[in-house]
Each structure stands twice: as structure tokens, then as C-alpha cells.
Amino acid sequence: MKETAILYLRQSRDAILSIIVCFGVLGTLDAAPIFQETEQQEAQTFNQYRGEVIDRDSKKPLVFATLTLEGTNISTVTNTEGKFLLKIPKSTKEGNVTVSFLGYKTKLIPLNALKGNANRISLTVSAIELSEVNISVPKNALLLVKETLRKKGENYFDDPTLMTAFYRETIKKRRRNVSLSEAVVNIYKTPYTSSRRDAVQLYKARKSTDYSKLDTLTLKLQGGPFNALFVDIMKYPEYIFTDESISDYEFSFDRSTRINDKLIYVVNFEQRPSINEPLYSGKLYIDAQKKILTSAIYSLNIVNREMASRMFVRKKPANARVYPTEVAYRVDYREKNGRWYYGYSNVLMEFKINWDRKLFNSVYSMTCEMAVTDWEKNLAGEFPKNKNRIKTNIILSDEAIGFADPDFWGEYNIIEPEKSIESAIKKIQRQLKKAKASGGDSAP
């Protein structure tokens, strides 16, 4: 009988990420059925381009840089190693790929100049003239943030939109990958001025877990894509800045920067010393001219371990103390025809489990990220029926299946796997092949 600790999504000031921790004796390999494509594979209808985006001077990779096919809604994001994979329909013969990154000059690359592999794209830092910063920065950072939130109806999508997004969640024990789940989802995005929540429909998913690295623990992320979607501050400000809680923060200006050759104010925020409840601190990147939030990077204050733990843990093994050591968030927005929309977000939570009468503790990290790879207006306002929507308490690893099909994602744009994830996938695939060869590939 397994004992379960449930950590679930809560609204208002509480943390967005949620997990489930199970305690029990587990096997050495998840015996989920191997995925077998039942439909005949269609002829490849796309070209794919792989490469990396780096800083021109330092040669360091640029993480979460955005690549978009100009004039379309097709895009992707670089991974934590600066690598990218971009898939373009074969029917598209010409065009430019826009490569952009926070604080760097945007670069346009002709599509026909890209190779299938080993593209190396370097970006140059966008310098800010001191005189420009001194003249432009307003005096009150709090009023600027309030104005930005108030102007979302002018600056963000005001039509219902159907988005295609790639979602990935990983669990690591220290630096070793333990579990990986991926999905393509349809997001029925409502206008930013609407109080109606977005709906998410699961299109395709896969997962792999090696429980031998988890000792006696099974870790699962509850909420799936909603963990990343609710980081959309402009759509869901109640998770960080309510009308009441915004006064609990102190706001100040940092050095300005540029995005796509536009001046961007950088606003620091942190909770006031007099506030005991764990809140957030970080940076907001706001377009100077139109007062648009283009990016936000922030983290949860977890100095008070017990209080931070209560935000996540609802039930746990009696002989274990579980508390987060880091909870961090990021959201990036993109622009199309003068309107902005949610483009990418990620959430990281690292936590420790201290066991009674054990000398060493266990350290785990859980990461989820989601990138919008295509979208179209949903002018008919279609919304999936309740039975076809995924719930906010979904556990994706329970819904997904194995990694056996190398062409699983087909033409969908995904975030290129990191080397550590790739090696983990290859290892588990080898284990699955061995299990199949020995006749042990059936589910228990």
C-alpha cells in the first residue's frame, strides 16, 4: 500500500507549481506499454532546421531565444543549451526567420540561407545610451506596473485564439533525469480582458520514467500544462499581483535594455520587509512606449521553510520533511501585428526530503515549460466540451505513453531536448528494446 502526499494548485498568492509524492516499494523500470503508431505514417511534409543561438562575443548559448518564421505564426524556442529545432512546411519556399533574445539586437535570416543542421546564429548585445535612459525612465515604478496591467486590453490579443503548444516536464534526482513527459496541447485562449479561463485539450503525449533512480519515492507533477499556462501574468494577475497584494511589494527601476530594438524598462520588485507571507521577487520587462509587459522573471520567497512547505505539501509520509529550496518562474510574450500574446513560460521547483534517522537527504528538481508553436484566431469562439478538456489537477505522466516511436511528433514544432534528456531517453529506449527482446514488454 503506497502512502501519498498530495500537493495541488492553489489560487491567489500561493505557488503555481504542484506535485504528488508517493512513498512505497517500486520496481526498477516503468512498464508502461510501448507506443505503437496505429495510423500509417504520412509522407514528411516539412523541412527541419537545427542549430544553436549564441552570444557573438562570448560564444555562450542564449537560452530561451525565440525563432519565428516572419509573416506566419510558426515559432520555436532554444533550450537550456541554446539549441533549436524549427520545422517549416515544404510549401513555404521563401521568407525570413526572426531570431530575438532579451537585450540583444534582433536578426533576420533568409530561410534559404539555413541548413538542415549545424546552423550557428550569433546575436549582438543591444547597447543602451545613458542619456536615453536618464531622459526616458519615469519616476514611479509602481504606477508604471499598474498602468501596464490596466492597458492589457489595448496591447494584448482581444480575440479568442486557438494555440498549438509544446509542453515538457522533467523530474531529476540531483542532476540525473528520472522522469520525462511531453505533450502537444491545444490552448483555447480567451481574450485578455475576459474573466473566462483558458481551456486546454491534450492532443498527443508521451512519457518515460526510470524509478530505479527514485529510491522509494515516486514523484509526479500535478496540473501539467496549467502550471506553465498560469504563469501568464497578464491573463492571470491574481497569482502574483492582486489589487490588494500589489501594495505588499516594493518596486524600483533597474538598468533599461532593448527587445527587438525597442526600449524596455526593467522593474525590480520584492516583498516589503514587514510582510511575513511568502511572496515573490524578480524583474518585469516593460515596453517603454506602449507600456507592455514583454517578459517577467521571478521567484518565490522561501526563507520560511515551514510556511513555504505548507504552500505545496498537503499530505506526506510521517517520517519525512519536505520543503522547497527554490521556486522560479519565467514568462515571455510575443508580438503580432501590434498585439502581444503568451509565447513561452517555465517553472522550476527544487526541494529536499529529509528522512528521520537517515544521514543523507534527497534533492529533487521538477521543471515544466511550454512554448506556443503556432496559433490562429478562433473567431467562432469554439470551446471544447468539458469531457474533452484536461483538468487543472491532471497528472500528465499518468495520461501519456512510452517513447518507442522516434517520429512521434511529426511536423509539430517542439523544444529541442537537452543532452542530458536525450541520453536519458536513449538509455530507456535501450532498456525497452531489451525488455521486448526478452518478452518482458507487457504492462503489469
Image (cartoon, rainbow, N blue to C red):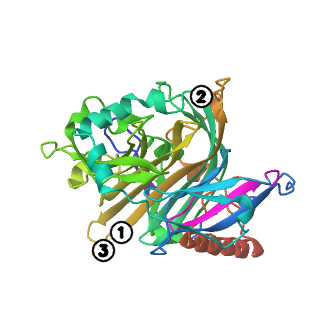
Q: Which amino acid does the dot numbered 1 rest on?
A: Ser
Could you tell me how far apart the alpha carbons at marks 1 and 3 are, in whole angstroms? Answer: 7 Å
- Residue to which mark 1 is pinned: 362
Where does the image place residue 14, in percent across and percent down from the top left?
A: 32, 41
Q: Is residue 375 left or right of residue 332?
A: right
Which residue lies at the image location 63% right of the left edge and 27% below the top edge?
383
Which residue lies at the image location 26% right of the left edge and 34% below the top edge?
143
Could you tell me how far apart the alpha carbons at marks 2 and 3 are, in whole angstroms? Answer: 51 Å
**Residue 356 is a magenta residue:** no
Q: Which amino acid does the dot numbered 2 rest on?
A: Pro
Of badges 2 and 1, the one in the foreground is 2
Relative to 358, residue 84 above or below: above
Disc ID at residue 112: none
Are the two marked residues, 1 and 3, in contact with CB atoms closer than 8 angstroms?
yes
- SS type, badge 3: loop
Snapshot quadrant of residue 201:
top right
- Residue to which mark 3 is pinned: 360
**In this picture, which residue range is highlighted in magenta?**
77-92
Where does the image place residue 45, in percent across and percent down from the top left?
A: 82, 54
Residue with the most extreme front position: 131
Toward the viewer: 343 or 164?
A: 343
